[in-house]
Image (cartoon, helix red, strand yellow):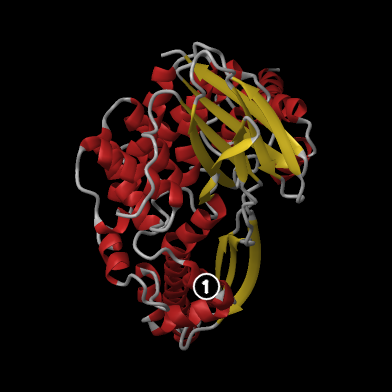
Amino acid sequence: MKRSRRVLLWSVAVATAFFAVGCRSDYNAANQQALADKYYSGDIKGAAEYAASISDAERDETKHSALLWHLEAGNTNLDAGNYEESLRCLNRAEKLIYLIDGSSPRFHRPGLMTYHGTRSDRLLLHLLKGFNYLAEGSTEDFLVEIRRLRAEQFRYVLDEADPELRIYEAAHCGNVGVPPMAMRKILGDRDKNAIFGASGLAGAYTEYSQRRRPQLPLLYNPLAFYLSALGYAIDNEYEEAVIDFRYLLMLDPDNRLYREDCAALIRALGDKLPDTLQNVRKTAVPADQTVCFIVARGCPDGWENRRLTYVLPGKVPTDWSFSFPAYRKADDPGFSVQCGGAEIAKGEHLVDLSEIVNEEFWQYTFPRMVDRAYAATLAMTVAHESAKAALVAALASPKSDYKHLVVASARLAVAATSRAFVSELEWRRWVTLPRSYSVAHVQLPPRGTPRKMTLVANGSDGKKENFELEFSPEANRAVVYLREVNQGKYVLKKWESMQ
């Protein structure tokens, strides 16, 4: 009787554990595709509800893809105008990042079970939180998030990047064909270069190398520095704003917006313009009575998968599966701002997140993937040689009742170590995030006059879309955010501040 009762209790416990495990939904690439289908078809509300439901289900999860779902929910709910829900989901994401990182950044790499977030994910998290604060009417909290965005940018460079990286890039400015620092080490090693050759990415690498920035790698996200500079200008901290613009001009020396804003700030400080900015036209400092237009477009490129086998001299074959950016070049069609029927500003392209992901892949991710694949090959080769030696010893051992078992076991060990297997496949990326951002800023019309403007967006389908905007007489500054979700489908946000 007691035994039967124990069996019954054990069965109930097993069933309970089974159903408890089964209750957790395994959200995967199919769920993200469903979200993307809703979002990019223009069903922003449906996408926001869908993403929020997954974020709610994952709110106590600390592993797997929980961070990704919180980010997706934060962005889609911002676009849907659900600011409180957006902020709740973004706060979940931020707390999870702190838990993942511990004392230092731990960015995601393909193949990890738990999604850690990329540099771009984490920077844009602060921008979206800032937008939510603008919607709540708090310019001060918006500026705090912009400061945090800038601080994160420097933290990545100082804590994650090799300290020699910036020096290396600056030293080889304008030298076509010079590889990224980490790739140089790969190309200079016979075996690792052979793995690179087997990867089939030589063409993609060559194309990337020809587009590299001249002085600073794109690990320095231009959007972070530009918004930081605007924030400092608003707070009348022009010296700090000029520091940000100096980084921006190293990234893109010919950018009209960077040049004009930097020159305006230097003039306001009463300092002498550098020779490179002597002929820049005079413009107003981007501070009070300013409207900042931010136009976001597209969807960042995802991942492509590759499966191959490479054989290095004297090493066991290695079956290698990995993902790499499905980079496709895309042009930003631009936008303009009109007032009274006359064009007063053109948008300037700031950042392409697919370019940044591609930069990160070649500067960091791919060289480390090659290192890990090579280490796996070496480790399995050593194990294979040991297994073969053990088999030889087993065959040479005296006859006994157990010799056939020992030999059989040794043969199995030889077979099991005859190939190395490395998998770094990935499907996760923040799919509802815009791919590119362009910016313009203009002066608000004087108080007492009609405060009306027209934002003219050049659509990715070649058509123009006009958005009529009217600003309140009390507005001191404003932010206009336009998201082109798909061809002809837009989400417009306008936030004003009386501060």
Q: Position of residue 172 (x, y in %)?
A: 31, 72
Number of residue marks: 1
Q: Position of residue 494 (x, y in %)?
A: 59, 23
Q: How many neighbours does mark 1 have within 10 angstroms: few (below 14), some (14-19), or many (20 or more)?
A: some
Task: Residue at 29%, 54% (x, y): give it.
Answer: 278
Q: Is residue 264 left or right of residue 94?
A: left
Residue 498 falls in image quadrant: top left
Q: Amino acid at mark 1?
A: Tyr
Q: Which of 419 and 326 lies nearest the eye of the viewer?
A: 326
Can residue 46 be seen in this snapshot? yes
Q: Is residue 484 left or right of residue 337?
A: right
285 versus 450 height, above or below: below
Residue 70 falls in image quadrant: top right
Quarter that holds the C terminus: top left
Quarter that holds the N terminus: top right
Task: Residue at 53%, 22% (x, y): give it.
Answer: 132
Q: Which of 292 and 450 lies nearest the eye of the viewer?
A: 450
Q: Which of 423 and 203 lies nearest the eye of the viewer?
A: 203
The residue that disc 1 covers is 205
Residue at the far left in the pictured view: 271
**In what element is the residue under mark 1?**
helix
Can residue 402 be seen in this snapshot? no
280 versus 241 height, above or below: below
Task: Residue at 65%, 63% (x, y): give it.
Answer: 305
Q: Which of 447 and 172 lies nearest the eye of the viewer?
A: 447
Task: Residue at 55%, 44% (x, y): give it.
Answer: 347
Q: Is residue 341 left or right of residue 362?
A: right
Q: Position of residue 395 (x, y in %)?
A: 50, 85
426 versus 382 height, above or below: above
